[in-house]
C-alpha cells in the first residue's frame, strides 16, 4: 500500500495517517493508532479490495491484532465526566482507512509444494475467448493499461490478468466445477476458509488460478468471539453450519483448494426450530449475506445467489410475513428516558408517510416517565426496571392465553372507553371490610408496600378511589379470578402491554455503565458478567420474546471499543443468531443539523421478511473530531470519497439559542414569553408546535394560541460559583485561566502566579478553586469555561455544573438553561420536562439527539414501505425535515 508523498497539507497528512492505521490493523503492528483528526471523505471501496494471492515467502498477517484496543474514550461519559483533552483536534471527518479492509484477509496457504502439483490443472477446453471476455472483461484488460491505472479510490488494481478461463479444474484427484463451493487452505492451525469458486483461469503468469467469493462463519465477521458467549444465564451459540456469503472476492492459486463442500441456501426464518427442520442434508448452509460495510447481515435477493443451491421450495419455510400494510405501527421504547429517541423516530417516520406511534415506554426513572407521559399522552408509560417489565410480559402472555384472549389473527385494538380513574362503586362495603372492586394494573418488581419481587396486581378497592389503590401479590388474590379475568380482558382490548408478535418496532439504548471510562472497576475480561452491563442481555431477551418487526438500538461508541468491542459484537451476534438482519452505523449528531458533535452507535435489526433499514447520510457539513473505533470505521455513516454531496453549513451555538430571552442564575419560572422573533431557520423550526411539526393542522391554518417558552431556567449555582462565573470575561475561550493569580506555564499547564495573592470570595473561599487548577493535571481549559456563539458543543452531558465542562452562556452569568441544552439536543420547544432541575438536565443529556432519531425514523418509514434501494445508506430529501410544511415556518 502506498501512502501519498508528504505535501504539507493537513488533509493529505491525515489520509496517510489513516492508511498507516489500517496497515497496523492488517500487519498486527503493536503501535496503538493515535486518534488523529482525519478527513471524513472515505474510500468506500475498501471492502472490495482484493488481496493479492500470497507470495510464497509472505508471512500471514496477524489480523487479529485489534486496533480497536484503544482505551474507552469520551463517548461513554456519564454526567460531568471529562472528555479526553488530547482528542480535541478538529478536522472534517473520521477517515476511512484508505484502501485496506480491516477485516481479516484471507491469505490462503498452499497445500503442498510445487513439485507435488502434478494433479493440479484445468479440465476440458478453455471457454471461447469472446465469451470469457464478456463475462470477465477486467481480466482481459491490457496489462500495460492496468499497471498504470489507479482506481478511483486510490488503490492499485491488482487483479491477476487472464490468458483464458475454464469451467472445470482438478486438484488432488477432486474435480471442481465453476460455482462449486469449496474449502480453501488457511494458514497452519486455522480452520479452512470457505468459498464459492466464481472463476477458473490461467493467468498471464502461466499459473492456474481460481477466484473465490468468500463465505464467512459468524466468528469471521464483526461478531468475532461474541459468536458464543457466557452471559451468566443460557449463553447462545450460532449454528456451526451457518455461513454468510460475503461480497469479498480474491484470486488464489488453484492448488489452495482442499475439498468440495456442500452449501445450500435456505430462507431465513425467525422460527428457529422450523428453520432447523427446513434445512436439507448439507455440510453448511447460508441464508444471509455479510458485508464489512456497516457490519451488515442481510437477506439476498434470489438473483444475487443465483448460483447458490437454494433448498427445494417445500423445505424453505420462510416465516410468516408480517409486512402487510397496517395503518399505524406500534413502537416500544425501552430505557425510554423522556422519550427523545422514540419522538424522533415517530416524527421521521411520519415525514416518510408512515404513521408510527410510541405505544409503550419503560424506564425506571419516575421523572423521565412523567416527562414522557406528558408529551405522549397516548403512550402506556411503565415506570419499572426493564428486567421486571420482561417478567410482566411473560406473565401477561400467560394470562392472555389462560383466559383465551390471544387470537393470532386479530391484534388488540386500542379502546379508550374504559378508563381506570373513577372509584369502582359509589358505596363502600361494611366498615372494616375491603372488597376487591377491580384490578387496574400489574407489575413484577418491588412496590412501595410489597418488597418481594413477583407478580402483583394493583387493586381498586370497592367504594374507594385511585388514591387508595394498593399492590397485592397474586398469591393473596386466589378468590379474584373473575376480577383478574376482567382486568386481562380490558387490558387486552386497550393493548396495555405488548404480546409476542404485536410490536412493530422496539427502540432503545440499554445503559452499559460498566464501560464508562470513570468506572475503575470495569470488567474488560467478561463485560457481560458486570452487573452494570447486564441490560444489554435484558434488552436482547425482550427482543427475543416479543420478536418485533424492527429493532433500533442506540449506544455510546465505547461499546465498540471497550473489551475489544465485545458489547457491540454481542448485540450484533444476538440479533443475527435470532435470524434478524442487522446493520451497524456510527452517527455524529452534528451531521444532522445541530451545533453538537455527539457520536453514537446505532444498530438496526429487521425480521427476515422485512426490508433492512438504511442509514441516512449526513445533511450538514459538520466539523467532526476523531473518536471512532478504527475497526468499525466501515460503520461511520458518511459519504464515499468521490460521491457528490450537497451538505448544508454546520450549525453553531448562535443558530440554536440566540433568540432566547436573557435569564439570571436564579431564574425560577418554568414558563415565560419568548419576547423576540426567531432569528435563524433552526429557531423557526424548533419553535413549531407539535401540530405543525407533525403536519396535523388543516391546510393554511396556523396555531392560534401564543405559546410560552418552557424550561428556560438554569441550574442555580451557589453563591461562590456564581461569583466565580461573574468574574469570567464574556469573550471567546474565556475560562478560569482568565482569573487573577492563574498563569499558563509550559505544556499548557496552569500554575499559580507567585506575584499575585490568592483572591478570596466574600465567603472566604478562593476565587479559583484548587480542583480547577488540578483538573486533568492542570491542562484542561474546561473549568468555568464559556461557550462562544461560533462554537459547536462537544457533547451535551447529563449534569450542568460548570466545574469541569464548558457550559457557561456566552454573555450571561449562568450555565446554559434546561431549554438551551434541549435545543442543542434538537428537542422541539413544545417538549416539556418534569422533575427537579437536575433531573431535567439528566433527561436531556441522556437523550438521543432528536434530529438523528428523526432521520433514522425516516429511514425506518422507507423500509416499512419498501422504498429505496438495497444500499447501506441513502440521501435524505433536500429539505428534510421540512418535507411537508415548509411554508408554515416563516
Ligand atoms: N433513549 C432515551 C434516553 C435513555 S437514557 C432518550 O432518547 O431520551 C437511559 C435510561 O435508562 C435512563 O432514563 C435510565 O433511567 C434508564 N434505565 C437505566 N437502567 C434501567 C433499567 N434497569 N430498567 C429501566 N430503565 C433503566
Image (cartoon, grey):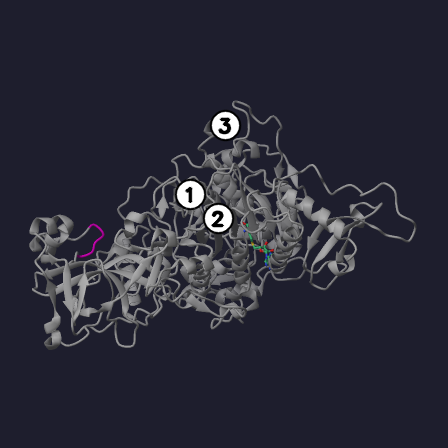
- The answer to whether the beta carbon of the residue marked 3 is less than 8 Å from any atom of ligand 1 is no
Residue 362, horizontal then vertical, whole percent = 61, 52
Q: Nearer the viewer, residue 862 or 648?
A: 862
Q: Quadrant of the N terminus?
A: bottom left
Report the residue at 28% width, 53% height from top: 11
Q: Nearer the viewer, mark 1 or mark 2?
A: 2
Q: Taking 683 as reference, is 6 above or below it? A: below
N-term-proximal mark, 3 vs 1: 1
Report the residue at 30% width, 50% height from top: 41
Determine the secondary structure under disc 1.
helix
Determine the secondary structure under disc 3.
helix
Residue 611, horizontal then vertical, whole percent = 40, 46
Can residue 588 be spotted in the picture?
Answer: yes
What range is drawn magenta here? 152-156
Can residue 600 be spotted in the picture?
Answer: no
Q: Residues within 10 Å of mark 2 (few under 14, many from 20)?
A: many
Q: Quickly name the residue at label 3.
A: 888
- The answer to whether the beta carbon of the residue marked 2 is less than 8 Å from any atom of ligand 1 is no
Report the residue at 77% width, 51% height from top: 459
Q: Quickly name the residue at label 2.
A: 549
Q: Nearer the viewer, residue 658 or 483?
A: 483
Q: Mainly helix, strand or loop, the magenta region?
A: loop
In this rendering, position of residue 289 left or right of residue 690: left
Residue 863 badge: 1
N-term-proximal mark, 3 vs 2: 2
Amino acid at each position: 500500500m502506498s501512502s501519498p508523498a508528504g505535501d504539507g497539507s493537513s488533509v493529505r497528512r491525515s489520509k496517510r495517517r489513516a492508511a498507516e492505521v489500517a496497515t497496523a490493523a492488517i500487519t498486527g503492528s503493536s503501535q496503538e493508532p493515535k486518534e488523529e483528526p482525519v478527513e471524513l471523505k472515505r474510500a468506500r471501496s475498501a471492502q472490495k479490495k482484493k488481496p493479492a494471492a500470497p507470495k510464497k515467502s509472505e508471512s500471514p498477517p496477524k489480523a487479529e491484532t485489534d486496533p480497536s484496543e484503544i482505551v474507552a474514550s469520551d463517548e461513554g461519559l456519564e454526567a460531568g465526566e471529562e472528555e479526553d483533552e488530547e482528542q480535541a483536534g478538529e478536522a472534517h471527518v473520521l477517515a476511512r482507512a484508505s484502501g485496506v479492509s480491516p477485516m481479516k484477509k484471507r491469505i490462503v496457504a498452499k497445500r503442498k509444494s510445487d513439485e507435488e502439483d502434478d494433479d493440479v490443472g484445468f479440465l476440458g477446453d478453455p471457454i471461447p475467448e469472446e465469451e470469457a471476455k464478456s463475462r470477465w472483461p477486467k481480466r482481459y484488460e491490457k496489462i500495460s493499461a492496468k499497471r498504470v491505472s489507479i482506481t478511483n479510490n486510490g488503490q492499485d488494481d491488482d487483479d491477476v490478468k487472464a490468458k483464458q478461463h475454464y469451467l472445470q479444474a482438478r486438484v488432488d484427484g477432486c474435480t471442481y466445477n465453476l460455482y462449486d463451493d469449496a474449502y480453501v487452505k488457511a494458514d497452519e492451525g486455522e480452520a479452512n476458509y470457505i468459498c464459492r469458486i466464481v472463476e477458473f483461469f490461467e493467468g498471464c503468469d502461466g499459473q492456474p488460478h481460481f477466484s473465490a467469493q468468500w463465505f464467512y462463519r459468524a466468528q469471521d465477521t464483526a461478531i468475532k468471539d461474541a459468536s458464543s458467549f457466557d452471559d451468566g444465564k443460557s449463553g447462545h451459540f450460532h449454528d456451526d453450519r451457518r455461513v454468510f456469503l460475503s461480497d469479498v472476492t480474491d484470486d488464489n492459486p488453484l492448488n489452495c483448494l482442499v475439498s468440495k463442500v456442500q452449501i445450500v441456501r435456505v430462507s431465513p426464518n425467525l422460527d428457529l426450530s422450523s428453520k432447523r427442520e427446513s434445512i436439507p442434508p448439507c455440510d453448511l448452509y447460508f441464508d444471509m449475506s455479510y458485508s464489512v460495510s456497516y457490519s451488515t447481515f442481510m437477506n439476498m435477493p434470489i438473483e444475487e445467489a443465483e448460483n447458490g443451491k437454494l433448498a427445494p421450495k417445500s423445505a424453505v419455510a420462510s416465516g410468516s410475513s408480517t409486512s402487510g400494510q397496517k395503518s399505524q405501527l406500534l413502537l416500544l421504547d425501552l430505557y425510554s428516558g423522556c422519550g427523545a429517541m422514540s419522538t424522533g423516530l415517530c416524527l421521521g417516520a411520519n415525514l416518510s408517510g408512515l404513521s408510527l406511534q410510541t405505544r409503550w415506554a419503560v424506564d425506571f426513572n419516575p421523572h423521565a416517565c412523567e416527562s414522557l407521559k406528558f408529551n405522549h399522552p397516548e403512550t402506556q408509560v411503565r415506570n419499572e426496571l426493564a428486567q421486571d417489565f420482561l417478567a410482566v410480559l411473560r406473565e401477561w402472555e400467560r394470562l392472555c392465553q389462560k383466559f383465551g384472549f390471544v387470537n393470532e389473527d386479530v391484534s388488540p385494538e386500542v379502546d379508550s372507553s374504559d378508563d381506570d380513574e373513577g372509584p369502582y362503586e359509589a358505596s363502600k362495603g361494611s366498615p372494616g371490610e375491603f372488597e376487591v372492586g377491580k384490578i387496574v394494573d400489574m407489575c413484577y418488581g418491588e412496590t412501595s408496600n410489597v418488597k418481594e419481587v413477583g407478580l402483583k396486581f394493583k387493586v381498586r378497592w370497592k367504594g374507594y378511589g385511585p388514591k387508595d389503590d394498593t399492590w397485592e401479590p397474586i398469591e393473596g388474590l386466589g378468590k379474584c379470578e373473575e376480577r383478574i379475568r376482567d382486568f386481562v380482558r380490558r387490558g387486552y382490548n386497550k393493548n396495555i402491554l405488548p404480546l409476542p408478535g404485536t410490536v412493530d418496532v422496539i427502540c432503545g439504548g440499554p445503559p452499559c455503565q460498566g464501560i464508562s471510562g470513570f468506572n475503575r472497576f470495569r470488567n474488560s475480561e467478561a463485560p457481560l458478567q458486570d452487573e452494570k452491563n447486564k441490560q444489554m442481555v435484558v434488552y436482547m431477551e425482550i427482543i427475543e420474546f416479543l420478536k418485533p418487526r424492527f429493532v433500533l438500538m442506540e449506544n455510546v461508541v465505547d461499546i465498540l471499543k471497550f473489551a475489544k468491542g465485545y458489547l457491540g459484537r454481542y448485540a450484533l451476534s444476538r440479533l443475527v443468531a435470532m435470524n434478524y438482519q442487522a446493520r451497524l452505523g456510527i452517527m455524529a449528531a452534528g451531521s444532522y443539523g445541530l451545533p453538537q458533535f455527539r457520536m453514537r452507535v446505532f444498530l438496526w435489526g429487521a425480521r427476515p421478511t422485512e426490508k433492512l433499514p438504511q442509514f441516512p447520510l449526513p445533511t450538514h457539513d459538520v466539523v467532526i473530531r476523531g473518536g471512532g473505533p478504527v475497526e468499525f470505521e466501515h460503520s461511520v455513516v458518511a459519504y464515499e470519497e468521490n460521491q457528490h454531496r450537497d451538505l448544508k453549513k454546520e450549525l453553531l451555538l448562535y443558530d440554536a439559542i440566540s433568540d432566547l430571552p436573557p435569564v439570571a442564575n436564579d431564574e425560577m419560572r418554568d414558563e415565560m414569553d419568548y419576547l423576540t422573533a426567531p432569528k435563524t431557520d433552526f429557531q423557526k423550526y424548533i419553535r413549531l408546535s407539535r401540530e405543525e411539526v407533525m403536519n396535523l393542522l388543516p391546510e393554511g391554518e396556523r396555531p392560534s394560541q401564543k405559546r410560552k417558552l418552557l424550561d428556560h431556567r438554569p441550574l442555580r449555582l451557589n453563591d461562590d460559583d456564581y461569583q466565580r462565573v461573574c468574574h469570567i470575561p464574556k469573550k471567546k475561550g474565556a475560562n478560569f485561566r482568565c482569573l487573577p493569580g492563574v498563569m499558563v506555564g509550559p505544556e499548557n499547564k496552569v500554575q499559580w502566579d507567585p506575584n499575585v495573592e490568592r483572591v478570596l470570595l466574600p465567603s472566604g473561599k478562593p476565587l479559583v478553586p484548587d480542583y480547577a487548577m488540578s483538573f486533568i493535571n492542570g491542562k484542561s481549559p474546561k473549568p468555568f469555561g464559556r461557550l462562544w456563539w461560533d462554537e459547536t458543543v462537544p457533547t451535551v452531558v447529563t449534569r450542568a455544573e460548570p466545574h469541569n465542562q464548558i457550559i457557561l452562556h456566552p454573555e450571561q452569568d449562568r450555565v446554559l438553561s434546561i431549554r438551551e441544552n434541549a435545543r442543542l439536543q434538537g428537542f422541539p420547544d413544545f417538549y416539556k420536562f418534569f422533575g427537579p432541575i437536575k433531573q431535567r438536565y439528566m433527561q436531556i443529556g441522556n437523550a438521543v439527539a432528536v434530529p438523528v432519531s428523526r432521520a433514522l425514523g425516516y429511514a425506518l418509514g422507507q423500509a416499512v414501505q419498501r422504498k429505496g434501494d438495497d444500499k447501506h445508506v441513502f440521501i435524505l430529501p433536500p429539505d428534510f425535515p421540512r418535507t411537508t410544511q415548509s411554508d408554515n415556518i416563516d
